[in-house]
Amino acid sequence: MQRDEPVTVNATETSLRIIEALQDLDGAGVTELATHVGLPKSTVHNHLQTLWRNEYVVKNDGLYDVGLRFLQLGEHARDRRRVATIGPPEIDKLAEASREMANLLVEEHGRGVFLYKAKGSDAVHMDTHAGKRVYLHTTGFGKAILAHLPDERVDAIVDRHGLPARTPHTITDREELEEQLDRIRERGHAFDREERLEGLHCVAAPIVTDGAVVGAVSVSGPKSRMRGEWFDEELPTLVERAANVIEINLTYG
């Protein structure tokens, strides 16, 4: 272990792995869970019993799942971000105006986290929900945030998470990413052309207050509709306006 690495508690890390596995598996029994995380059944059982006793997991017919106690913690974490309480009305308006899916996202631990989404009349179903975590370099709103972070912060994020590919269109080259971030800073908005999900396009704008980026807004939709002047000019204007209103409300509200 390097000297600058934080000291961690193995038992806590194991419990967290088990909780995340329960989410991935949509609930599971001890045997399936132990196989999934690669730990002895007795170890997994002991951790589950501790989590159950403290009301962080539930158990029904031998199957364990994440408990609603996390909902309280999640809402507390979300509401600590002022943008999470101020942003939603503008996201609703953006969804109505664009007729697509509008999103509000922030950065935490070098990943993008969805805080809120609103469906327009033509919005397609996507894999996003409040709390969903994504790699910043794979999304329009993630790149909008990266473009307004200090260089050393961007370096730290890329060093930690890398630039993994989600689709054949994902940026996986650091130099190419830097070029895109330069263009995003110049024009004020970012594009995602099938970089996280194939068939999906996105346009996003950062939310910046007091010189610091606090989040981003975006509109996502199928590439068959997200093209031409609508995608290149009209939609960026709508997204930038929404971001600007949120910025003003954050600053003076």
Image (cartoon, grey):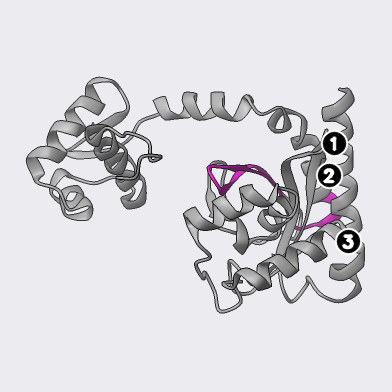
Contact (CB < 8 A) between labels 1 and 2?
yes
Q: Identify the residue position indicated by label 2 in the image.
A: 243
Query: Which residue: 82% across, 38% down?
Result: 211
Quarter of the image with the C terminus in it:
top right
Nearest-to-viewer mark from 1 and 3: 3
Q: Residues within 10 Å of mark 3 (few under 14, many from 20)?
A: few
Query: Which residue: 29% across, 31% down?
Result: 57
Q: Identify the residue position indicated by label 1 in the image.
A: 247
Query: Which residue: 35% across, 51% down?
Result: 24
Residue 237 appears at what percent x and percent y? 91, 57
Q: Which secondary structure dominates the residues rendered in magenta? A: strand
Residue 127 belongs to magenta span: no
Q: Residues within 10 Å of mark 2 (few under 14, many from 20)?
A: many
Residue 103 belongs to magenta span: yes
Marks 1 and 2, how far apart in space? 6 Å
Residue 30 appears at what percent x and percent y? 15, 44
- What element does badge 1 sit on? helix
Residue 239 appears at what percent x and percent y? 84, 52
Tag 2: residue type?
Ala
Magenta span of residues: 96-118
Q: Identify the residue position indicated by label 3 in the image.
A: 187
Residue 17 numbered tag: none
Marks 1 and 3, how far apart in space? 18 Å
Contact (CB < 8 A) between labels 1 and 3?
no
Of mark 1 and mark 3, the one earlier in the sequence is: 3
Is 201 situated left or right of 244 in this image? left
Contact (CB < 8 A) between labels 2 and 3?
no
Of mark 2 and mark 3, the one earlier in the sequence is: 3
